[in-house]
Amino acid sequence: MGRNVCVIALGVGESQARCHATPPPSSCQDYFPRMLFPRAAGILLHPTSLPSPGGIGDMGPDAFRFVRWLADAGMKIWQVLPLGPTGYGDSPYQCFSAFAGNPLLIHLPEPARPHVGHSAATPSAHVCDFGAVIQAKRALLDAWFDTMPYDDAVQGFVREQDAWLPDYALFMALKEAHGGAAWTSWEHGAARREPASLRTWRNTLRPAIERCYKEQYVFFAQFRALRAVCAEHHIQLMGDVPIYVAHDSADVWANRSLFTLHDDGTLKVQAGVPPDYFSTTGQLWGNPLYDWDAMARDGYRWWIDRMRASLSMFDVVRLDHFRGFDAFWEVPAADTTAVNGRWVQGPGAELFTALTAALGPMPIVAENLGLITPEVEALREQFGYPGMAILQFAFNDPASDFLPHRHDRALVVYTGTHDNDTTVGWWNSSGASDSTRAPEDVEREKAFARQYLNTDGHEIHWAMMRAAFASVANTALVPLQDVLGLGRDTRMNFPGRQSGNWSFRFTWDQLPAALTARLRELAQTYGR
């Protein structure tokens, strides 16, 4: 597949650094206007972290209260992680569907959740125990939806979502019928999607399929209500689109020809990234890789549908692992680390030209972290997407583009993301347990940070937030853990760790009026 991207001869820095590419001349390729967002600040918080009843956050009253808190604190953006139905490791980046909503985020009305607040919220209001929560809430959801009529409203919703919902509902019903097993081990006809077999299964599993339809109808109805509250309080909702989908997903099962799979559906190769800041052996993600030639022959229909669905839900979307669209790291399927991968050319500008032709200019933030080359930055610049800067990565090099004095307006600056430690955790870290940094590198970074931020480390989270908010970058985003000054035990994700992630929750007593006023004053001081 051809790519019409000019190569700019610039040096490549450390793995977490970002090269700055000057756009090539207009004779080389068409360029789109830069996507400039209004100057604003916001909070990164996944809905599971809300203090809702039942041991997990949801889209009910606590979500509405959080929106009101954001507005009171002078924030204008709420960034969430992917909202799909989670599978392996409870990760929002390993979902059973790129289109469906996570039923665990559905708010159960009071009559449908007797005593659930006490039974599933242990052992701590600050930790989501996914094992206990999933078992308890799934039972309550099933009981509720079994009594809910499959009426005209639900059937109309199913017709509207015909491009993905029937396949997803059948996939989930089949998965349940096969004891939760991955689709590659199902009954042959179901795994291979043989038409006669699927007809039989649809008839047999009709109650479970209709329950899934009702579940998705309620999820999106509650999500629309939350969006309306956000709009009422002038809060933009920012979503997240992972580049890859899970192997055990309706997306792969229903679209096998678009992925690099063996005839039996198993992986030929898998996704990951080479050794980086977080791991000396790289990160092995286990996702199937796209067959980009097959997608191109289809006019990138699946990606157009996916981005259309995401943009219908969110005001802005973060496009995860943007560098993988230029070139991606391909790892043999049998490997247990990502060390022996290789770079393979991606679709590049051809994909984004097709997306823009179908959907118009898209409010995308490109996650341009990792090993970023001039070609990756040229692709991002060509379509005008703002990139990202992470302050926790800024102090390893006095020439880092992540330092605030090197920012530009078309940028989103973070103290850290869901993959980083909290700012307090980062500051107190020796480096060995959470990154590939040597202790002497950590001390050198801290010395430079003290000098740059004019701080002795006291309230380091406020010093970092002030630097982010003062930046010329139009968008500044902060994980709620940093606003609260929390440590490493509240970190959302440890890249490469397969379990024990995503569990952070807060309680309302952690957001007193004085803290809210202090955050609001910081935003006002720097015109956000």
Image (cartoon, rainbow, N blue to C red):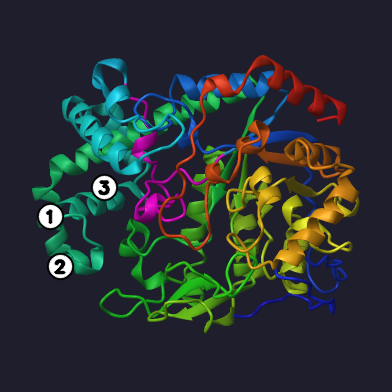
107 part of magenta stretch:
yes
Q: How far across and how far down the image is residue 294, in percent? A: 46, 74
* Residue in front for this viewpoint, 228 or 360: 228
Comes first in the chain, label 3 or label 1: 3
Q: How far across and how far down the image is residue 332, in percent? A: 44, 82
Q: How far across and how far down the image is residue 284, in percent? A: 48, 70
Quadrant position of the C terminus in the picture: top right
Comes first in the chain, label 3 or label 2: 3
Choose top left, top right, bottom left or bottom right for residue 370. bottom right
Q: Secondary structure at mark 1?
A: helix
Residue 361 seen in the current view: no
**Residue at mark 2:** 189
Crowding near the residue tagged with mark 1, few <14, some 14–19, many ≥20 C-alpha atoms within 10 Å:
some
Choose top left, top right, bottom left or bottom right for residue 382. bottom right
The disc label shown at residue 201, or none? 1
Residue 363 seen in the current view: yes
* Residue in front for this viewpoint, 195 or 411: 411
Q: CA distance from mark 1 to mark 2?
A: 10 Å
* Amino acid carrying mark 2 in the image: Gly
**Residue at mark 3:** 169
Q: Is residue 238 above or below residue 379?
A: above
